[in-house]
Image (cartoon, grey):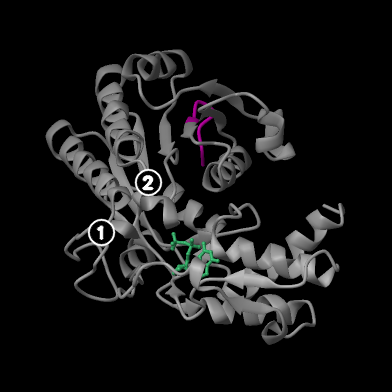
């Protein structure tokens, strides 16, 4: 049971993960404070159910003193960090900014916790990209890290700082090593949402074809809402530890297409085109996670399977496009 003094700070509250976390915490009775880079047009970027129920504050992740002030003013008992440059093709862009925001900002947060109140609990959204060119598959918490991108390197730096603050200063800080997690709120630059939105458009006669990159690429895809629950559970444990959060099952982009079009009574063969300009440089590594530790210690289990997830996203896109949401 959450005490009525519980309040949580979520960085990146307007993103997919931040908004699901805000909903979960509100349902548990937390006071929720969210940071955003920019409070302009916030109404367009935050689901209606959150708009009047969360408190918003601007933080660009770059100034530690501003974050100190936020902690002093709002006194959160838990912090969840989602603000970051995202993965995908952008993993190699602007490495300096990626290092600042995905890496160094975590040290700013940890330092602020240490200075203001060491009892604040902290959960970091880490990434499968820390394994990069992984040396084994599936990966677990003991797999040797080997990032292949500035994105992965920055996330790994953040994880290292978390371990250091945990060991040296006793801060309750932990990393959730998250594999791909999707939902109707996923950005359109990710392949899942690109497919579900375009398939819905095709069904409604708003588009004819869907151009993709390599449709034999595979990922370990889960439902974002489930991954958020795991992170909340991590902060309710007696001890701070890092956990891999994944389904352990891989599917191809092709299967994604199959299920998305099937949901709409269509055959993907009639609409999907592989476009070499969308291909990424070789992706030889099979990134799939083993979440046995989370299952055993947190009692966590994904509640939604791959097909159900694709159906959920297609249904949501149909509702959005027909304004029946
Ligand atoms: P990522 O796992 O963070 O790279 O997430 P994405 O959703 O961007 O990509 C997942 C996989 O889908 C990758 O292997 C991509 O190469 C593959 N893919 C194939 N076609 C596309 C496409 O049109 N867009 C994107 N984003 N990915 C695609």
Please state if 321 lies on the left or on the right of 123 as rendered. Answer: right
Tell me if residue 71 comes above or below residue 4 in the rendering: above
Q: Tag 2, which secondary structure?
A: loop
Left or right: 160 in relation to 197? left
- SS of the residue under disc 1: loop
Q: Which residue does the numbered mark 2 point to in the structure image?
A: 93
Of residues 194 and 127, the one nearer the viewer is: 194
Residue under the image location 27 percent in, 33 percent down: 104
**Above or below for 242 versus 133:** above
State the image quarter where residue 106 is shown.
top left
Point out residue 62 in the picture as x, y percentages from the top left corner.
36, 24
Tag in front: 2 or 1: 2
Q: Dot 1 surroundings within 10 Å: few (below 14), some, or many (20 or more)?
A: some
Predominant SS along the magenta part:
loop
From the viewer's side, name the closer residue of 96 and 171.
96
**Which is nearer the N-term, disc 2 or disc 1?**
2
């Amino acid at each position: 049971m959450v005490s009525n003094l519980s309040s949580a700070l979520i960085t990146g509250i307007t993103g997919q993960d931040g908004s699901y976390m805000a909903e979960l915490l509100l349902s548990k009775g937390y006071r929720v404070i969210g940071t955003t880079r920019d409070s302009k047009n916030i109404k367009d970027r935050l689901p209606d159910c959150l708009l009047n129920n969360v408190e918003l504050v601007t933080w660009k992740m770059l100034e530690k003193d501003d974050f100190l002030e936020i902690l002093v003013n709002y006194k959160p008992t838990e912090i969840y960090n989602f603000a970051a440059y995202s993965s995908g093709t952008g993993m190699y862009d602007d490495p300096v900014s990626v290092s600042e925001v995905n890496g160094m900002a975590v040290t700013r947060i940890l330092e602020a916790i240490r200075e203001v109140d060491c009892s604040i609990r902290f959960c970091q959204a880490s990434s499968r990209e820390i394994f990069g060119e992984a040396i084994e598959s599936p990966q677990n918490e003991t797999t040797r890290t080997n990032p292949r991108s500035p994105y992965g390197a920055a996330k790994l730096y953040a994880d290292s700082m978390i371990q250091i603050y945990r060991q040296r200063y006793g801060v309750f800080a932990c990393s959730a090593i998250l594999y791909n997690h999707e939902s109707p709120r996923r950005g359109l630059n990710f392949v899942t949402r690109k497919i579900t939105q375009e398939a819905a458009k095709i069904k409604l006669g708003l588009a004819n074809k869907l151009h993709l990159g390599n449709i034999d690429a595979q990922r370990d895809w889960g439902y974002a809402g489930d991954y958020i629950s795991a992170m909340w559970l991590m902060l309710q444990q007696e001890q701070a530890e890092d956990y891999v959060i994944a389904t352990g099952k891989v599917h191809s982009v092709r299967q994604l297409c199959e299920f998305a079009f099937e949901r709409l009574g269509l055959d993907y063969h009639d609409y999907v085109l592989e476009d070499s300009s969308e291909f990424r440089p070789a992706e030889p590594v099979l990134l799939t996670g083993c979440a046995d530790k989370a299952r055993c210690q947190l009692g966590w289990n994904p509640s939604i399977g791959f097909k159900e997830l694709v159906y959920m996203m297609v249904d949501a896109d149909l509702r959005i496009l027909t304004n029946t949401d």
